Image (tube, rainbow, N blue to C red):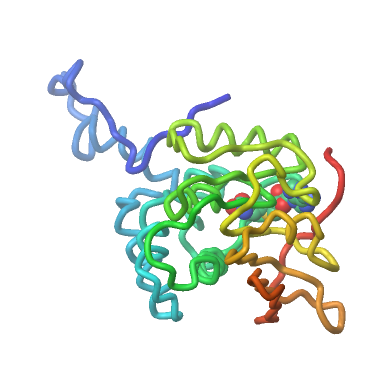
Amino acid sequence: MTRRPSFPARIDFSHGQPTPAKKAGTVANGGLRAVVERVLVKPQGMGMDSVAVRASMVQKLAAQGISDAAVLQAMATVERHRFVDPALVNQAYEDTSLPIGLGQTISKPNVVARMMELLRHGVPGKLGRVLEIGTGCGYQAAVLSQLATEVYSIERLRGLHDKARENLRTLRLANLHLLFGDGMAGFPRGAPYAAIIAAAGGDAIPPAWLEQLAVGGRLVAPMVAGGGRQALVVVDKTAQGLKQTLLEAVHFVPLKSGIA
Ligand code: SAH
């Protein structure tokens, strides 16, 4: 597997310093450094410093109404371009969903941030244990790892589970645990969860998720609501029972059972 360069691509000039060109025209246009940068950096579409690109994405999120500072900080920290196909790197910080293979998509930054904000609902400090259904490429799991003490993320497609593992390896997020399996059943061994988040939507919230949610905990998930359209659903589990709130329309991939 080819390794992706880090961004901005760091080029080590400490060895083999370019010697002045023997013949005029051998290394034109600013010498070896410029040539290497043209070849290595520009085609990646991330010639700019990715910190600045993320800062601008975060500014847009704030302008769109995301106000939780911890969420904005997490969005500024996690390098979204590491999780998308090299051919899509230059779109990594646009407010758009992107294909991640096997017919699945990574949600647009605004939707990720919105769900994180709903999940935290202003509670100070970090969330406790969180379960994510639908690891996909691992991006949202990485964002969650910034906001929770422990994250369990489950994926039903082996190809994506492996891809997420690869994408996340160099980040060494010790509090993030990737699981391969059918998330419809949740992950009882990690229960109860302070929060549960799903990145795929079914016709109803699977009962296992509600069982595994701690009292005082919150679940955020897409669900097919009225008229066959998906909406975001928030379920709060209180000592008095479950309270469900239907929010805005969303477009997530379907929640499916079994593994593949
Ligand atoms: N959060 C992801 C988004 C991935 S899209 C990211 O940041 O990339 C939703 C994912 O949910 C898909 O990868 C899909 O395979 C997965 N999925 C659907 N049904 C599932 C189930 N029952 N259990 C686990 N994962 C499921």
Q: Nearer the viewer, residue 45 or 245?
A: 245
Q: Which of the 4 image quarters holds residue 20?
A: top left
Quarter of the C terminus within the rendering: top right
Residue under the image location 63 percent in, 71 percent down: 238
Q: Farthest top residue?
A: 16
Q: How many marks?
A: 0
Residue 96, visible in the rendered structure: no
Q: Residue at x 43, y 68 (%)?
A: 123
**Up-down relation of residue 136 to residue 202 (above or below):** above
Q: Is residue 126 above or below residue 122?
A: above
Which residue corresponds to the image point at 52% horizontal and 40% vertical from the top-left?
Answer: 176
Q: Position of residue 45 (x, y in %)?
A: 43, 50
Is 196 placed left or right of 174 in the picture? Answer: right
Q: Decide which of 40, 231 is in the foreground and name it.
A: 231
Q: Give the farthest residue toward the left.
A: 20
Taking depth in this image into account, of 82 and 148 the one nearest to the observer is: 148
Q: Where residue 103 sits in the image (x, y, percent)?
A: 76, 51
On screen, 15 above or below 142?
Answer: above
